[in-house]
Image (cartoon, helix red, strand yellow):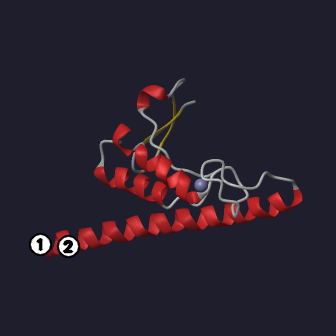
Amino acid sequence: MAENNSDNNFYNIFIFDLLIFIFNLLTCIFEFLIFILGLFINMTKGCKKCFQTNVWYYRCNECNAKQFQQDFPNWTSGNEFIDRFIQETQLNVQSNFIVIEWVPYNRFKNIEYHDKGVSGTIYKAI
Ligand SMILES: [Zn+2]
């Protein structure tokens, strides 16, 4: 039984790290494409918060992470694993464009049934 638990923990940590890795990889690819696009269109240089000039978009990664960290006490998904995953991705934010955020149920409108999957039911909303 004890061995089973440690196997499960290993599996959960592995899945957690894998999800973070995939998320960061996709973000890097997207940022690279935006960077290439930025070479062709004239975008404003510099962070609007700390005025660092070596970033070419709206806010630098450090200022983005600080902003998210200040907001941690104001939300929870009710699931420690999901909270930690979202917080971890927000602290390691690499993008001004791709961010994972917890949206409480009461902020959704027009909730409609979409489909039933293997692990649950899928709804769509605005
Ligand atoms: Zn900054």
Q: Quadrant of residue 33?
A: bottom right
* Residue found at x 53% / y 24%: 109
**44 sits left or right of 107 in the view:** right
Q: Which mark is residue 2?
A: 1
Q: Is residue 115 left or right of residue 78?
A: right
Looking at this rendering, what residue extends furthest in the top direction? 110
Question: Where does label 2 land, which residue?
Answer: 6
**Residue 90 drawn above or below residue 29:** above
Q: Where is residue 47 in the image (x, y as percent from the top left)?
A: 66, 53
Which residue does the image show at 54% across and 53% down from the upper left? 63
Q: Nearer the viewer, residue 103 or 52?
A: 52
Query: How far across and how far down the image is residue 106, in percent?
Result: 43, 26
- Report the quarter where the C terminus lies: top right
Dot 1 and dot 2 residues touching (CB under 8 Å): yes
Q: Residue furthest left?
A: 1
As shown in the figure, which amino acid type bears the numbered disc 1? Ala
- Crowd around label 2: few <14 · some 14–19 · many ≥20 (10 Å): few
Mark 1: few, some, or many residues within 10 Å (few <14, many ≥20)? few
Q: Quadrant of the N terminus?
A: bottom left
Distance between mark 1 and mark 2 Cα atoms: 6 Å
What is the quadrant of residue 37 in the picture? Answer: bottom right
Q: Is mark 1 on a helix, strand or loop?
A: helix
On screen, residue 87 above or below 70: below
